[in-house]
């Protein structure tokens, strides 16, 4: 069974939270109602989100959350809901993150295979910039997140590898010059491709992701609450994974293991 909520709803939902228009080609009303209700309860009728930290781990499937739930304890403790989601085909990183941040299907945004061109269509980042917000992408060089959203009037903190993204994100939060932080870490994806999706060394990467999310959210929440900002936090992965016939991790298919994912959402309270 495939999940009913689809990744195209992420960008309109975040846009609604900030009180700005959704990316131009998306469907503005295609939003995640549970998240909208959570934000409404948190902000009240006359206030919107002012800061957001979106953590983007790669390839963390729904089935991993279901089978190894304890590994997600730090994520659960820092958020208010876990929503089962469905990604798009082909279930590969540039296609999926393009869909997440444009709010449209691959046939519309144009990335329909594993390639990393700069997106020319409107994105959540464009909407934030147009509305006076300051977004930043923190990601390792050569990954999809460091490439497909380039050429915009925003900052990009590009590290030499995924291991350095966490430290770069902490440093950026110290300065707190931004309103929207998109932080990508691809460590689980990188390891599971070589070792298998349930190898001990692969599953250890989920522990690392959960710990990084915990520390980033706690730092941002403490800082933003002290300064009186209303804030949003989310764990937004791109696609799932499964083992191939020789026991190495892979994805890109229409299997449930690849398409079904889970996103976690929380607020500053």
Image (cartoon, grey):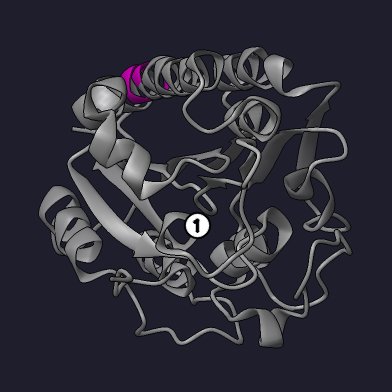
Q: Is residue 254 above or below residue 172?
A: below
Query: How would you classify the magenta stretch by its main secondary structure?
Result: helix
Residue shown at the point (49%, 47%) measured from the top left: 237
Across the whole image, how many numbered discs are drawn on residues? 1
Relative image position of residue 264 (x, y in whole percent): 31, 44
The image quadrant where one finds the N terminus is bottom left
Q: Report which quarter residue 59 is drawn in.
A: top right
Residue matched to label 1: 258
User: Is residue 60 among the parts visible in the rendering?
Assistant: yes
Relative image position of residue 16 (x, y in whole percent): 37, 69
Residue shown at the point (23%, 64%) measured from the top left: 36
Residue shown at the point (80%, 21%) measured from the top left: 161
Residue shown at the point (55%, 14%) measured from the top left: 201
Q: Is residue 161 above or below residue 66?
A: above
- Nearer to the camera, 88 or 180: 88
Packing grade of label 1 (10 A; few <14, some 14-19, many >=20) is many
Q: Is residue 219 magenta?
A: yes
Specify the segment rendered in magenta.
218-222
Q: Is residue 22 above or below residue 35?
A: below
Relative image position of residue 37 (x, y in whole percent): 15, 63
Secondary structure found at label 1: helix
Q: Specify whether 265 is left or right of 55.
A: left
User: Is residue 124 among the parts visible in the rendering?
Assistant: no
Check the image and name the residue furthest to the front: 245
Relative image position of residue 213 (x, y in whole percent): 43, 24
Q: Specify whether 12 is left or right of 105.
A: left
Q: Is residue 155 magenta?
A: no
């Amino acid at each position: 069974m495939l999940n009913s909520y689809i990744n195209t709803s992420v960008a309109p939902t975040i846009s609604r939270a900030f009180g700005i228009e959704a990316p131009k080609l998306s469907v503005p009303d295609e939003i995640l109602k549970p998240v909208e209700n959570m934000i409404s309860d948190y902000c009240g009728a006359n206030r919107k989100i002012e800061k957001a930290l979106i953590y983007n781990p790669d390839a963390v499937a729904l089935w991993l959350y279901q089978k190894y739930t304890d590994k997600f304890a730090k994520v659960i403790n820092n958020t208010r809901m876990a929503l089962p989601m469905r990604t798009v085909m082909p279930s590969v990183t540039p296609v999926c993150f393009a869909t997440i941040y444009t709010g449209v299907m691959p046939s519309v945004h144009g990335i329909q295979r594993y390639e990393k061109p700069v997106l020319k269509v409107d994105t959540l980042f464009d909407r934030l910039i147009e509305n006076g917000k300051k977004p930043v992408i923190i990601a390792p060089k050569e990954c999809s997140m460091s490439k497909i959203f380039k050429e915009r009037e925003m900052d990009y903190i590009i590290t030499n590898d995924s291991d350095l993204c966490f430290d770069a994100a902490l440093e950026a939060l110290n300065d707190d010059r931004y309103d929207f932080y998109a932080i990508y870490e691809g460590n689980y994806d990188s390891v599971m491709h070589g070792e298998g999706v349930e190898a001990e060394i692969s599953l250890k990467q989920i522990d690392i992701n959960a710990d990084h999310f915990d520390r980033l959210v706690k730092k941002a929440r403490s800082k933003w609450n002290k300064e009186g900002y209303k804030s949003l936090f989310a764990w937004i992965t791109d696609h799932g994974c499964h083992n191939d016939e020789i026991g190495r991790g892979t994805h890109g298919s229409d299997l449930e293991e690849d398409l079904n994912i889970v996103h976690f959402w929380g607020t500053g309270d």
